[in-house]
Image (cartoon, grey):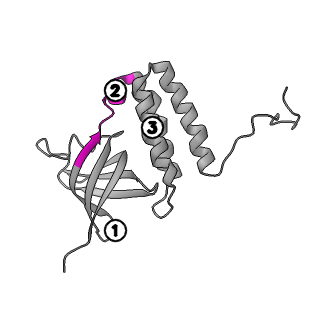
Amino acid sequence: MAADTYSLQALVLRKTKLGETDLIVTLLAQDGRQVRAVAKGARKPNSSFASRLEIFSEVDLLLVCGKSLDIVKEAKLLNAHIGVREDMEHAAAAAPIVDLLTRLTQPDLESPRLYDLSASALEHAESCDATGALAVCAAFMLKAFAFSGFRPSLNRCVMCGRPLA
């Protein structure tokens, strides 16, 4: 009996080494849920997955359902976000974005607006200077928390509750 396959558009959030040549990739799916999958042979120098499954990359994947983790069979790069990956200051500004996404998302909890927000934030961080990238990251965090139900109150004092002028 053949295993079920499905396609998935996702953003790569994290990579974890598995064995000598495999990787576990943590992804933000287009519907906003977190997906973890194994990319077999992805750490080999001649692997087709090596460049396509980099952090910050948007990819179109073909996955096979596995017992505990899905298995990556094909990966097509949609947007590499080269500007974020090649510049250290841009990467430092964008790193909290993927770290927050890793912590906010869950495997069975969909948040459809989160993917579009994340892809847009990375695109804008890539197109501006390093200071602008930090501002994009801060704006992303406020919006992502709001999507998750945490809305900061910026019009009252945290200590005493008095309205701010």
Residue tagged 1 = 68
Instruction: Identify the residue position indicated by label 3 in the image.
Output: 120
Q: Is residue 50 magenta?
A: no
Distance CA(mark 3)–CA(mark 1): 31 Å
- Callout 1: few (<14), some (14-19), or many (20+) C-alpha neighbours within 10 Å? few
Across and down, in percent, residue 158 comes to: 80, 36
Segment colored magenta: 76-88
Answer yes or no: is residue 127 visible: yes
> What residue would you read off at disc 2?
83
Q: Position of residue 39 (x, y in %)?
A: 24, 54
Seen at 33% across and 33% down, the residue is 81
Residue drawn at the location 49% of the way across and 58% of the way down = 106
- Relative to residue 87, is residue 25 depicted above or below? below
Say the numbered circle drawn on residue 19: none
Kindly check if marks 3 and 1 are in contact, taking CB atoms under 8 A apart as contact. no
Which residue is more in the foreground, 165 or 41?
Answer: 165
Q: Amino acid at mark 1?
A: Ser
Mark 1 to mark 2: distance in Å? 34 Å
| Left or right: where 163 falls relative to 101 | right
Q: Position of residue 5 (x, y in %)?
A: 25, 67
Disc on the earlier residue, 3 or 1: 1
Depth check, front residue: 161 or 120: 120
The three-letter amino acid code for the residue at tag 2 is Gly
